[in-house]
Image (spheres, rainbow, N blue to C red):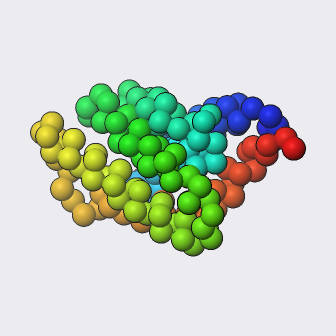
């Protein structure tokens, strides 16, 4: 648990989310892997919008693109859009119960996937299988647990 500066906790959780995202899994488990990095960017953009925000989304997206993206910058753009939405609406999202937050997270992740889908199509790397949408659902389902775990990583000093 970090006190004071959220950037240290943010860095630790982003590294952990990147590892969880890149960790090799069996193909049947790979299909349902939640978007750990997207959830982490969403959480920090809602909880600490000035410390995280659009820059966090852009940097995390570039890291993800460097490791696995077919087009450099596609995840960076999509995560920056995701962070923008979260920063812009952070007060409204924070005031909702966790179930409603999960629905908002689901809608935001659908938007994230639509951006990735469009970039993949425009660049000639279309992935048109319906399985592409499963991580969006699993991410929204684990949002309450992910938010609780991420909340334990940072407690502001009072």
Horizontal side, residue 136 vs residue 16: left or right: left
Q: Is residue 114 above or below residue 140?
A: above
- Taking the spot 30% from the left edge, 28% from the top edge, the residue there is 72
**Which is nearer the eye, 35 or 4?**
4
On the image, which quarter does residue 107 sit in? bottom left
In which quadrant of the rendered image does the N terminus lie?
top right
Q: Is residue 129 shown to the viewer in this render? A: yes
**Which is nearer the eye, 147 or 19?**
147
Q: Is residue 39 shown to the viewer in this render? A: no
- Taking the spot 52% from the left edge, 46% from the top edge, the residue there is 87
- Taking the spot 75% from the left edge, 50% from the top edge, the residue there is 152
- Taking the spot 47% from the left edge, 43% from the top edge, the residue there is 83
Q: Is residue 131 above or below residue 20?
A: below
**Which is nearer the eye, 117 or 30?**
117
Residue 35 x/y as whole percent: 46, 51
On the image, which quarter does residue 122 sit in? top left
């Amino acid at each position: 648990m970090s006190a004071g500066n959220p950037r240290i906790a943010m860095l630790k959780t982003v590294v952990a989310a990147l590892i969880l995202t890149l960790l090799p899994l069996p193909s049947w488990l790979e299909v349902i892997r939640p978007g750990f990095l997207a959830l982490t960017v969403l959480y920090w953009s809602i909880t600490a919008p000035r410390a995280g925000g659009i820059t966090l989304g852009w940097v995390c997206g570039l890291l993800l693109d460097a490791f696995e993206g077919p087009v450099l910058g596609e995840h960076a753009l999509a995560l920056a859009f995701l962070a923008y939405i979260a920063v812009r609406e952070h007060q409204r999202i924070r005031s909702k119960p966790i179930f409603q937050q999960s629905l908002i997270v689901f809608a935001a992740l659908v938007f994230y996937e639509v951006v990735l889908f469009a970039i993949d199509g425009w660049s000639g790397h279309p992935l048109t299988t319906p399985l592409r949408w499963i991580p969006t659902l699993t991410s929204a389902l684990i949002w309450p647990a992910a938010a609780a775990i991420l909340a334990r990583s940072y407690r502001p000093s009072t």
